[in-house]
Image: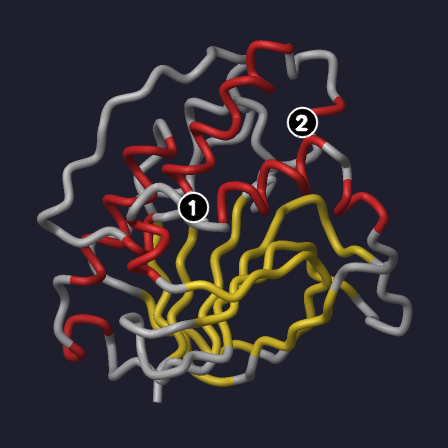
Amino acid sequence: MNCAGLLCVYCSPMFSATAKIALPVVLALATTGLAQNPSTPTPAQTVPAATPAPAAPAAPSAAPKVEDQDSFIIVGVTVRTNNTKEATGQGDIPGLWQNAVQNGTLEQIPNKTGDGYVVVYSDYATDNTGDYTYTLGYRVTSADKIPDGMVARTVRAGKYSVFVSETGPPQEVIPALWQRIAQMTPQQLGGARAYQTDFETYGAIVDWGNMQMFAHLGLK
């Protein structure tokens, strides 16, 4: 899946050299949650400790909440990929995150609204078994100025089923949420998935081992 909701921690004093080294491992697991399936075990990893976040996390959702979502735009970096490739551990998503976070790429984005990263899944070739476009960035008020090497993506307006992960190590809680979603029927999801735009949102994270993600699934 950010930082997607991974605020600009890398430039904060609390973001140590140790955390920078561990970041690719955390992101490799955290951002491939969509590619996991219920039979795929998740290897244990060690995540460096950091200062706990002051805000209380949202309660995880056993059932989704269906919401009417207005259209919005994000600007960020992007890659075309698929779940089969990402599940091998040799996918493109971890490198996209690593470069964006460590190089401060996303901090060039103008017209940002908030510090929480957003990931948009779009341009599905078929469904979650085919290719899709993965874009990591910030929500913006205007995409009239897009930095070189970045793109704008529009999240379609409509009904979205919203799930909340547990709070904890990203390599555990993010794949666990997507695995649970993968096992659910359209009735349990609140409707059939549209496979037009889905997105993830993250709050400002100050503890890399204690994260939470919101998954928004577009419905027909």
Residue at the (75%, 47%) spot, across then down: 106
Amino acid bearing label 1: Thr
Q: Secondary structure at mark 2?
A: helix
Residue at the (45%, 82%) spot, across then down: 196
Judged by depth in the image, the label closer to the viewer, 1 or 2, is 1
Residue 213 percent coordinates (x, y): 43, 46
Q: Name the residue carrying label 2.
A: 9
Looking at the image, residue 220 lies above or below residue 184? below
Residue 208 percent coordinates (x, y): 49, 24
Q: Tell me the quarter of the picture where residue 150 sits.
A: bottom right
Circles 1 and 2: CB atoms closer than 8 Å: no
Looking at the image, residue 44 lies above or below residue 201? above
Coloured how? secondary structure
Tell me the number on the disc at residue 31.
1
Residue 17 percent coordinates (x, y): 64, 11
Q: Residue furthest bottom?
A: 220
Residue at the (87%, 56%) spot, across then down: 110
Tell me the number on the disc at residue 213.
none
Q: Residue furthest left?
A: 39
Q: Residues within 10 Å of mark 1 (few under 14, many from 20)?
A: many
Q: CA distance from mark 1 to mark 2?
A: 17 Å
Looking at the image, residue 150 lies above or below residue 94? below
Q: Nearer the viewer, residue 162 or 154?
A: 154
Q: Is residue 217 left or right of residue 101?
A: left
Amino acid bearing label 2: Val
Q: Secondary structure at mark 1?
A: loop
Name the N-terminal-most of marks 1 and 2: 2
Q: Tell me the quarter of the picture where residue 127 sits.
A: bottom left
